[in-house]
Structures are given as structure tokens and as C-alpha cells.
Amino acid sequence: MRAGPAALAALALAAPVAGCGGGEPRGATVLAASSLAGAFTALAPDARMSFAGSDRLAFQVEQGAPADVIATADPAILRRLAGRGLVGPPRVFARNRLVVVVPRANPAGVRTVGDLARPGVAVVVGDPGVPVGAYAREALRRLGIAGPVLANVVSEETDAAAVAAKVALGEADAGIVYRTDARPVAARVRVVPVPARAQPQIAYAAAVVTRPPVRPDGEAFLRRLTGPEGRAVLRRHGFAAP
């Protein structure tokens, strides 16, 4: 069963706002991974933005959704789109890490990632088709606990924000998310680190959508995102430099 609150929150953040034209990035229409919502709205608050799981964003571009830029949590997604001529060259602009989040009361007593393998611990992860779900499974495989942890999964969500929301609402004992997605719910969750040896290489990339009409707003947004201002905003929101 999929959670609705996080999706509704993402839609609220993504409410379109009339932008200005010309080369200003605030006129861009941007499709971005849900984990980028806070950083992107801070970077360009007047841009038109829509946040969702990276796989959904790619599908929207494939279906011809009007957009100037797409930003995903997996560069491979953009490389596939670029190979079909749907977007320009992807540019990696940030990195992230995985963490485990548990409710503030931590009723299951989860102290380490290994505790997720204990029988009866209710775990939430991303769907295997979205980056956060794929990254979580990769980390669990590296730790040798994928089988027992995945046996405890009670819900697979469409993006990291939905995983964090489930845990924050007390609907699960633990979830695996990006560390940046733990920040908005910090008052309601505790963070359990994922060991460095298990961390996947999590990179975010963006590209200009090449479906006509191609506007200058997309390139302007990318310049701002990859420039000093973008790096500063991303750092404030917990992302690492590429």
C-alpha cells in the first residue's frame, strides 16, 4: 500500500508559479527528484517545478511533458534519455548518502542497520524501480543482509520523501532514505548511519530537455544550479559536492 501524505506534500511544493522569460532561471519549468524539493525551491522559488520519483520524471519526458530541465537521483536515467535524443548531456551536480530513519520513540529498538534484519521489524524502502529503492538494496547486499531485511519490508514507496513520511508518522519501525530526506522530518525521527563500506555512489544529474521548443531558461537554470550559488544552496540542504 502506497502512502499519500508525502505525495501531497510534494505536489504542494511543486505548485506552479508564473515565471519571467528571457535567460533568467526563475522562468524554467523543472522536473526534479523529490529529494531535491527543498534545495530547488530555495534556489529558484519562482520557477515552475514538479517533484516525483526519478523514474516517473523520465516517463513524463518520454511522454512529451512540457519541461525545460529534468534532474534525477541517478545519472543513468538521463544517459538513457540522452541516448534517445530527449535531453542534452547530463551534468552531475551533487551527491548524497543513505541513512536509516526510525521514529523518535524507536519502539523496535533499532540501533544499527543490522537490526533491520531482526524478525518483526517493519521496514519501509523505495520501490526497486526508483533510485532510492535500488540504492537501498545495493547497500543491504554489500552488508550481506538483503534477504532478511527485504523479508521485513511492509511497504515500497515511490520516492524517498514517502519513505521518510511513513516512518515519521509511526507507520513503520524504520526506513532507508537519503540523509537529506531525514532533515525535513528531523523532529519526528532519529537517524541511524549506514556504514561507509555499504554506501553506493549516489549522484544527482540534470539535463536540458531538448523537445521543442527549447528555451534559454533551461540552460540558465543549469548554470545557476552548477555555479557557486547552486553549490551553496545544495550544501545548506545537506548535499555533497559532485
Image (tube, rainbow, N blue to C red):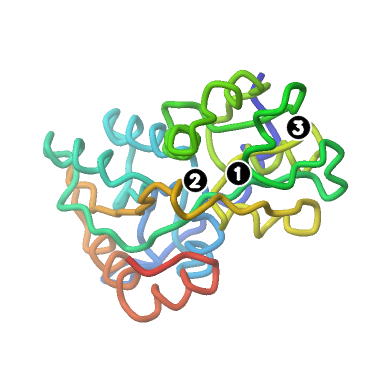
Question: Which of 124 and 113 lies nearest the eye of the viewer?
Answer: 113
Foreground disc of the pair 3, 1: 3
Residue neighbourhood size for the residue with mark 3, other residues' Cα within 10 Å, grouped as few (<14), some (14–19), many (≥20): many
Q: Which residue does the image show at 53% across and 66% down from the upper left? A: 238
On the image, numbered disc 3 is attached to which residue?
A: 172
Q: Amino acid at mark 1?
A: Ala
SS at badge 2: strand
Foreground disc of the pair 1, 2: 1
User: Mark 1 or 2 closer to N-term?
Assistant: 2
Residue neighbourhood size for the residue with mark 1, other residues' Cα within 10 Å, grouped as few (<14), some (14–19), many (≥20): many
On the image, numbered disc 1 is attached to which residue?
A: 161
The residues bearing labels 3 and 1 have C-alpha atoms spaced at a distance of 14 Å
Q: Amino acid at mark 2?
A: Phe
The residues bearing labels 3 and 2 have C-alpha atoms spaced at a distance of 24 Å
On the image, numbered disc 2 is attached to which residue?
A: 51
User: Which quadrant holds the C terminus?
Assistant: bottom left
71 lies left or right of 50: left
User: Mark 3 or 2 closer to N-term?
Assistant: 2
The answer to whether mark 3 and mark 1 are in CB contact below 8 A is no
The residues bearing labels 1 and 2 have C-alpha atoms spaced at a distance of 10 Å
The answer to whether mark 1 and mark 2 are in CB contact below 8 A is yes
Residue neighbourhood size for the residue with mark 2, other residues' Cα within 10 Å, grouped as few (<14), some (14–19), many (≥20): many
